[in-house]
Image (cartoon, rainbow, N blue to C red):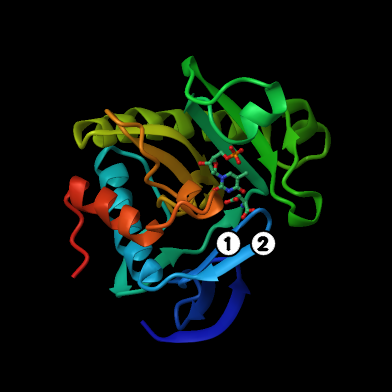
């Protein structure tokens, strides 16, 4: 598929048009960013690792009956995706307390959350992605109530599939963020799933294997992503 003009450049990925108006190219760059872009570094191989990691996870989700925007890998750092009409919301499920919930609620890291919690955040960099509730979403018209229900349903379904997938490979899925869009009127997953957008800990040692290694300056960032991939059976070369 022929790559045409750049449509959007995010902090770690770029989206390009193609000769098909319904298909975009998603380019995974080596840029690694945290804290709303305040910390940015280039990490060798990360684009390739995340692109292939994401393709593996998307195929697992599709096999479990969860529709995603992913079509196929195009090369080492690019994938083809369907064009969605994105909803400006981030859906976060947490199985274990970590990150912003610890700061906001003053709870310690590592508590099992039973049942898992669900949070919506408004996708707005200038405001630092504030947490919002379903009344805000309804009052400001960011999404229809039926689409809100479907986003929650799909985000929890992803939890059931991926929690078990990671557990079988000796890891805990601590939390993750997903974004959705509309495709022919249906709510569809329109996001990557990589260690950039979730937290993963070793089941026994609770060693951090995700982007917290970058956020917290723990080192071996891409090596950890590759270790997660190898444990799952992802082929990187
Ligand atoms: P948080 O603890 O910072 O709220 O993040 C929860 C999870 O969602 C964590 O795995 C990181 C991910 N996340 C993103 O990838 N991007 C975002 O913009 C946000 C708010 C969270
Ligand atoms: N999207 C947020 C940021 O880049 C969350 C993160 O730290 O990954 O600032």
Q: Is residue 99 left or right of residue 191?
A: right
Q: CA distance from mark 2 to mark 1?
A: 5 Å
Q: How many marks?
A: 2
* Residue 60: quarter of image: top left
User: Which type of secondary structure does the marked residue at label 1 adopt?
Assistant: strand
Q: Is residue 28 left or right of residue 133?
A: left
Q: Nearer the viewer, residue 201 or 120?
A: 201
Residue 105, visible in the rendered structure: yes
Mark 1 = which residue?
33
Q: Is residue 47 above or below residue 157?
A: below
Q: Nearer the viewer, residue 80 or 168?
A: 168
Residue 79, visible in the rendered structure: no
Instruction: Locate residue 196, reporting x and y percent.
Output: 47, 53
Q: Is residue 66 above or below residue 39?
A: above
Q: Residues within 10 Å of mark 1 (few under 14, many from 20)?
A: some
Q: Is residue 56 above or below residue 73?
A: above
Residue visible at 61% across and 54% down in the picture: 86
Circles 2 and 1: CB atoms closer than 8 Å: yes
Residue 37, numbered label: 2
Residue visible at 38% across and 39% down in the picture: 200
Residue visible at 31% across and 59% down in the picture: 223
Disc 1 Cβ-to-ligand 2 distance below 8 Å: yes
């Amino acid at each position: 598929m022929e790559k045409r003009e750049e449509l959007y450049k995010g902090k770690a990925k770029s989206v390009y048009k193609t000769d098909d108006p319904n298909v975009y190219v998603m380019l995974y760059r080596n840029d690694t960013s945290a804290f709303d872009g305040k910390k940015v570094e280039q990490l060798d191989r990360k684009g390739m690792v995340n692109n292939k990691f994401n393709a593996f996870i998307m195929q697992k989700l599709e096999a479990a009956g969860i529709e995603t925007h992913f079509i196929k890998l195009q090369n080492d750092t690019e994938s083809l995706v369907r064009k969605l009409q994105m909803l400006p919301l981030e859906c976060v499920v947490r199985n274990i307390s970590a990150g912003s919930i610890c700061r906001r609620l003053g709870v310690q890291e590592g508590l099992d959350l039973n049942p898992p919690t669900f949070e919506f955040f408004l996708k707005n960099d200038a405001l630092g992605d504030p947490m919002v509730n379903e009344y805000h979403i309804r009052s400001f018209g960011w999404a229809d109530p039926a689409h809100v229900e479907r986003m929650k349903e799909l985000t929890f379904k992803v939890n059931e599939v991926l929690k078990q997938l990671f557990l079988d490979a000796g890891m805990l899925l601590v939390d993750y963020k997903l974004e959705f869009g509309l495709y022919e009127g249906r709510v569809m997953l329109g996001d990557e799933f990589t260690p950039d957008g979730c937290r993963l800990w070793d089941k026994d040692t609770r060693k951090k294997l995700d982007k917290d290694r970058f956020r917290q300056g723990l080192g071996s960032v891409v090596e950890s992503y590759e270790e997660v991939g190898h444990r799952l059976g992802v082929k990187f070369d």
